[in-house]
Amino acid sequence: MSTPEVDWDLLTAEAIAIMAKAYAPYSRFKVGVAGLMDDGRIVVGCNVENACYGLGLCAECGMVSNIHATGGGHLVAVACVDQHGQALMPCGRCRQLLWEHGTPTTLLATPEGILPMSTVLPQAFGPQDLVDRAEERSFQA
């Protein structure tokens, strides 16, 4: 399968459209995200807050759920926007989600431009680490 061409304008427009549906009555900070999958489909997500602040869901969480609900695959490119439609850097937890559901070369639109995940999350911990480290011997003092 060849990698789909990234239409950043379309991806950003999809992120803006879903951002408008965010549920953010407490912070009033709406976030939308759109991801281009390796099979060419676009998946989206928006943030959903909760009165118990720590239980809110970031937009990327919704997008990852959408990935699995619509067939899985890997992210090729991601656009995340704030309530003004401007590029927004995902939080640390969400960078980890993007890493696990993308590849080191997955592209992310950031406030500093388009960057690969290997730059956005250097020295990332991923599923392969669990496999590789399960075979290592435990620490001996």
Image (cartoon, helix red, strand yellow):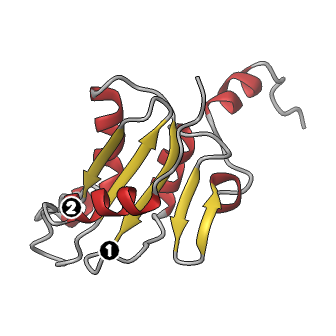
Relative depth, front residue between 9 and 141? 9
Q: Position of residue 39 (x, y in %)?
A: 46, 29
Residue 34 against residue 130 in the figure, above or below: below
Residue 66 against residue 119 in the figure, above or below: above
Q: Position of residue 133 (x, y in %)?
A: 75, 28
Q: Secondary structure at mark 2?
A: helix
Q: Is residue 45 left or right of residue 41?
A: left
Q: Residues within 10 Å of mark 2 (few under 14, many from 20)?
A: some
Q: Position of residue 44 (x, y in %)?
A: 29, 48
Which residue: 12% across, 63% down? Answer: 23
Q: Which residue is mark 1?
A: 82
**Residue 128, label in figure:** none
Q: Which residue is mark 2?
A: 17
Residue 42 in which image quadrant: top left
Q: Position of residue 110 (x, y in %)?
A: 53, 70
Q: CA distance from mark 1 to mark 2?
A: 11 Å
Q: Amino acid at mark 2?
A: Ala
Name the quarter where the N terminus is drawn.
top right
Relative depth, front residue between 117 and 2? 2
Q: Residues within 10 Å of mark 1 (few under 14, many from 20)?
A: some
Q: Amino acid at mark 1?
A: Asp
Q: Secondary structure at mark 1?
A: loop
Question: Does the CB distance between marks 1 and 2 fall below 8 Å?
Answer: no
Which residue: 36% across, 57% down? Answer: 10
Which residue: 40% across, 63% down? Answer: 9
Residue 63 in which image quadrant: top left
Residue 108 in which image quadrant: bottom right
Which residue: 44% across, 44% down? Answer: 36
Query: Which label's residue is closer to the chain start, 1 or 2?
Result: 2
Residue extending farthest to the top is 135
